[in-house]
Image (cartoon, rainbow, N blue to C red):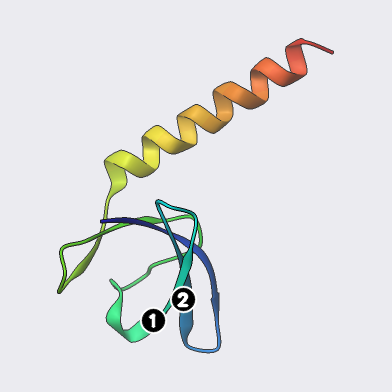
């Protein structure tokens, strides 16, 4: 399951699921140095940072932003 770190507050991370719903998870259960915007892979037991998917998402967002500003 892919999850995106939406925000981190008071020892908990709010993770956005692929269906756009949210869950709260203790930061202690997540990889060290996790930060907002990270894409996580959850195998049912362990969370791991998915850098490849995160990079693809960032590139897609940058591309959309460039497209929007070129139209102005």
Identify the residue at image location x=17%, y=71%. 46
Q: Quadrant of residue 31?
A: bottom left
Q: Which mark is residue 27?
A: 1
Identify the residue at image location x=30%, y=75%. 30
Disc 2 packing (10 Å; few <14; some 14–19; many ≥20):
many
Specify the farthest residue to the bottom.
10
Specify the farthest residue to the right.
72
Disc 1 packing (10 Å; few <14; some 14–19; many ≥20):
some
Contact (CB < 8 A) between labels 2 and 1? yes
| Residue 59 in the image, given as x and y percentages of width and height | 47, 29
Lateral position of residue 3 relative to residue 45, left or right:
right
For mark 2, what is the residue?
13
Identify the residue at image location x=43%, y=52%. 19
Specify the farthest residue to the top.
71
Q: Dividing the image into 4 quarters, which one contains the N terminus?
A: bottom left
| Residue 66 in the image, given as x and y percentages of width and height | 66, 20
| 52 relative to 46, above or below | above
| Residue 5 in the image, given as x and y percentages of width and height | 46, 62
For mark 2, give the secondary structure: strand
| 4 relative to 44, above or below | above
Structural distance between the alpha carbons of marks 2 and 1: 6 Å
């Amino acid at each position: 399951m892919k999850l995106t770190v939406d925000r981190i507050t008071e020892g908990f991370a709010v993770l956005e699921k692929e269906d756009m719903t949210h869950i709260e998870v203790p930061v202690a259960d997540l990889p060290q140095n996790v930060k907002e915007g990270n894409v996580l892979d959850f195998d049912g037991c362990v969370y791991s940072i998915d850098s490849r998917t995160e990079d693809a998402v960032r590139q897609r967002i940058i591309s959309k932003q460039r497209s929007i500003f070129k139209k102005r």
